[in-house]
Amino acid sequence: MAFTAADVKKLREMTNVGMMDCKKALAETDGDMDKAVEYLREKGLAKAAKKAGRIAAEGMAYATVLDGTGVIVEVNAETDFAAKAEVFVNFVKDVATAVATSDAQDLEALKAVKYPGSELTVGETIPEKVMVIGENIQIRRFARFTENTSVAYVHGGGRIGVLVNLEVGGGIDATEIGKDVAMQIAALNPRFWDKSLVTADVLEEEKKILVAQMDNDPKMASKPQQVKEKIAAGKLNKFYEENCLLQQAFVKDGSMSVEQYIASAAKALGGTVKFVDAIRFEKGEGIEKKVDDFAAEVAAAAGLN
């Protein structure tokens, strides 16, 4: 029985096994879909499909600079134990290499890229790693900087990854400056990089909150509305200092802002440094984690529910 590319795609969706293995399975079974699934199970490849639906909220956020290209990735696993295994860590680093050496713009494109040191693609390699690690693993997101000077920082063994992009002048080495800025971002997770990026709606909301606080303050409540609004506008500097990276107090020296630190450190080195952009990934952020109810699980196993 002949089979088509659509059959290969369908088998891949059914089993979460790589395209080449699906094609081989259909070839070995004369295009019989049921027998192809059975073939993959017998080969142990389809085990990955059972794991594919499980929540992967642990893992690793990783940032690096390869041949001048700054890369940051997040790859998830189900448990912290698996995320610390050498095979998983190496897989994450290989994925970062695939990002750096390709022009993939999304996950599907990345999965079609050749996996470093292999004839397989990144997507075809995932089920193999699932088999070895024994857990569902997912490449969640990635980004890269191809211009300027990038500095990478990984905090807590992969809990947070930060990639900072700087415009450097004067031929100086800005690695330490970039690392300090990245550590600040990792620790405080600012909402904005600079006060110029704060949108009008955010400012209006902040003013509204400040005015409402004065309305509820016995000492301020009787003041005219326009006075309260003027006072609120004057207090926005505090908002910038708390929420904008470049206006924040520099963690290592609270006497200056991050912006002042960058300028001062660059001048001391005999050059200039301008913050351009940054990306911060925290592993598992925004993923709904499964909370196991152990008592309910035991009761169910004992037939008490």
Image (tube, rainbow, N blue to C red):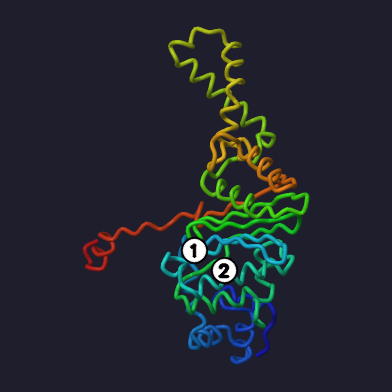
Q: Position of residue 145 (x, y in %)?
A: 71, 57
Q: Dot 1, how many residues are within 10 Å of its Cα: few (below 14), some (14-19), or many (20+)?
A: many
Q: Position of residue 263 (x, y in %)?
A: 69, 41
Q: Dot 2, how many residues are within 10 Å of its Cα: few (below 14), some (14-19), or many (20+)?
A: many
- Mark 1 or mark 2, which is nearer the start of the sequence? 1
Residue that protrudes farthest toward the right in the picture: 170
Please report contact status of discs 2 and 1: CB closer than 8 Å, yes or no.
yes
What residue is shown at x 49% (from left), y 57% (from top)? 159
User: Label 2's element?
Assistant: helix
- Label 2 sits on what residue type? Val
Residue 18: quarter of image: bottom right
What residue is shown at x 59% (from left), y 54% (from top)? 162
Residue 10: quarter of image: bottom right
Q: Which residue is mark 1?
A: 59
Quarter the N terminus occupies: bottom right
What residue is shown at x 53% (from left), y 85% (from top)? 40
- Label 1 sits on what residue type? Gly
Q: Which residue is mark 2?
A: 92
* Nearest to the observer: residue 146 or residue 216: 146
* Nearest to the observer: residue 143 or residue 54: 143
* Nearest to the observer: residue 128 or residue 174: 174
- CA–CA distance in space, label 2 to label 1: 9 Å
Quarter the C terminus occupies: bottom left
User: Label 1's element?
Assistant: strand
Please state if 144 lies on the left or on the right of 79 as rendered. right
Q: Position of residue 185 (x, y in %)?
A: 57, 47
Q: Determine whether 104 is above or below 132 in the image.
A: above
Label disc, if present, on residue 228 of the rendered structure: none
What residue is shown at x 34% (from left), y 59% (from top)? 292
Q: Position of residue 172 (x, y in %)?
A: 73, 53
Please state if 219 lies on the left or on the right of 66 as rendered. left
